[in-house]
Amino acid sequence: MTGLSLAPVLFTGCSLGMLHALDPDHLMTIASLSARTDEAGASVGRSETLRYAALWALGHGGLLVLIAMAAFLLGWTLPAVVPQLAERSVGLILIAAGAALLWLRHPPHGQAPRLREKVPFAVGVVHGLAGSAAMLALVPIALYQPLMAVVYALVFSLGVLAGMMLFALALGRAQLAMAQQLPGLAKAFRLVLGLGALGMGTFWLAAA
């Protein structure tokens, strides 16, 4: 495949990655995590929201690239049960995020730094496992040259990162505005997010 014909395919992959980042379960998870308050009861800032989103996208995209490398370079594929279990785990994560948002307003003392470092990345890995089959199905047949298929997966993952960062930027700005100008609305927003995450997680488990 020539560079001229490859460019639009990779552009499409990046665009599809950006759209994939905006899946409802992805957005609800990041919104629920970033809507938590810190140990002093203050809302998570815009920079922390971006950090959560970046860590999630790195976990999600890194896992997809590894799966693509295993599938297209080594001929190894995940057992079908793994994505299925990951789909159920997504539901459990949403329920846990919603419950924590409603009843555990901020991480226990001394736990915040560790949670901020590990939870979004780990959640991204689970989402990556759940969506791995769908991503591999999006690899164009014309790209079923092992190395180019991996490049496509990388570009797709970069699109996921870009899409999630754009969402986090908008969410962070909205959260900051609410916290500074409408604290009552910020509390209501956290309540709606918590209930929404619980509802979506329950539906996800039922449908998985």
Image (tube, rainbow, N blue to C red):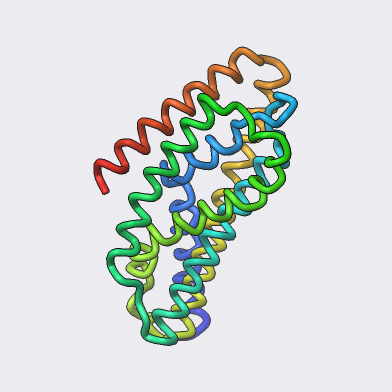
Q: Residue at position x 53%, y 63% from top?
A: 61
Rendered position, 146 above or below 171 = below
Q: Position of residue 112 (x, y in %)?
A: 69, 40
Q: Residue at position x 33%, y 78% from top?
A: 141
Which quadrant holds residue 12? bottom left
Rendered position, 145 above or below 199 = below
Nearer to me, 192 or 170? 192
Give the position of the N terminus as an image quadrant: bottom left
- Left or right: 105 with respect to 110? left
Q: Residue furthest left?
A: 207
- Left or right: 192 with respect to 111? left
Nearer to me, 46 or 93? 93
Rendered position, 67 above or below 171 = below
Q: Residue at position x 38%, y 57% from top?
A: 130
- Left or right: 120 with respect to 87? right
Rendered position, 35 above or below 111 = above
Which quadrant holds residue 122? bottom right
Q: Residue at position x 37%, y 82% from top?
A: 76
Q: Position of residue 43 (x, y in %)?
A: 68, 28
Tally of numbered tags: 0
Nearer to me, 52 or 37? 37
Q: Position of residue 140 (x, y in %)?
A: 36, 73
Q: Position of residue 73 (x, y in %)?
A: 44, 86
